[in-house]
Every structure is written in structure tokens, then in C-alpha cells.
Image (cartoon, rainbow, N blue to C red):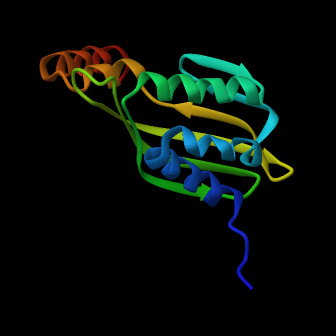
Amino acid sequence: MQQAASLPQRIKAFYERVSVERDAALVDLPALYGDQVHFINPVVDQHGLAAFREAWDTALRKYKVFKFNDVEVIGTDEQFTLVYSMTISFGFGPSFTTDMATSCRADGGKVIFLRDYFDPLGSLMQPFGPLNWLYRKVFGLLVA
């Protein structure tokens, strides 16, 4: 008898499925995320599965390309982290690729809290060589 996949592995499979099937993969959200899921990233702080679904819908409408690459997961069913790169494109102009991490906490077999970590400004500068260099130089002088 085959053992059911762990929650972290099912979340990883969901991200990989979104990369291929786009919004068709969103049917899995209620099985993976709690009704009151709390979702945070550098530009969003939302509560509830409906708001989380809307965030996915919005991203899939905006981005012609929306792919998660090299998804790795570490942790337990109660607390785990995904690391990956995400590539997006608006359908015009360059593609943007950014390294990301998503920290998840779960209860009752579903994710109830997740936080995305990424550098939004650095991601926008990445395709533009001189601007990217300037951004890294200035940020390095201020922070590092």
C-alpha cells in the first residue's frame, strides 16, 4: 500500500503544478490551505482562503509566464520551508527571475500561515545590467 505524500511534498507538487497547469491547479487550494490562512509577502498581508485564492488569480492574470523552478522543501508537516526561483513575464519586455523562500506553518494537515521572502526591487532590476549593478552597489554600501 502506498503511503500518502506529506504536506510539504504536496505543497511542492502544487507549486510545480501551477508552473504547468496555471489556474487549473488552484482547485487544490482548499485541500492544502486552511480557511483562515494568513499570507504575507513584501507587498501583501492577507487573511483567509478567499483572499489567498484571489492573490493567485491576480498573479496568473498579470503574468504570461509564472513558473516555479527547482523547488526544494525541508521541514516537518507542522513547519517547513520551500526554496525556489520564480520566473515571471508580463508578456512584453524581459522575464524576471528571483530567488525565493516560503516559510509555512500548518495545523490539522493544512497550511495556516505562510510568508514569502524575496527582494522585489532587486528582482525588477535583475534584467537591466547597469541598473542591477547600481542597485547592488548602493544597497551593499547601505546595508552590508
Q: Position of residue 47 (x, y in %)?
A: 76, 23
Q: Between 102 and 2, which is closer to the camera in this rendering?
A: 2
Q: Position of residue 31 (x, y in %)?
A: 76, 48
Q: Is residue 26 above or below residue 7?
A: above
Quarter of the figure with the N terminus: bottom right
Count up the numbered dots: 0
Q: Is residue 31 above or below residue 39?
A: below
Residue appearing at x 60%, y 24% in the figure = 55
Q: Position of residue 37 (x, y in %)?
A: 77, 32
Place residue 102 in its image quadrant: top right
Quarter of the figure with the C terminus: top left
Position of 127 with respect to 115 (left or right) is: left
Residue appearing at x 52%, y 32% in the figure = 117
Position of 30 with respect to 53 (left or right) is: right
Position of 83 with respect to 29 (left or right) is: left
Residue appearing at x 62%, y 40% in the figure = 26
Q: Position of residue 63 (x, y in %)?
A: 40, 27
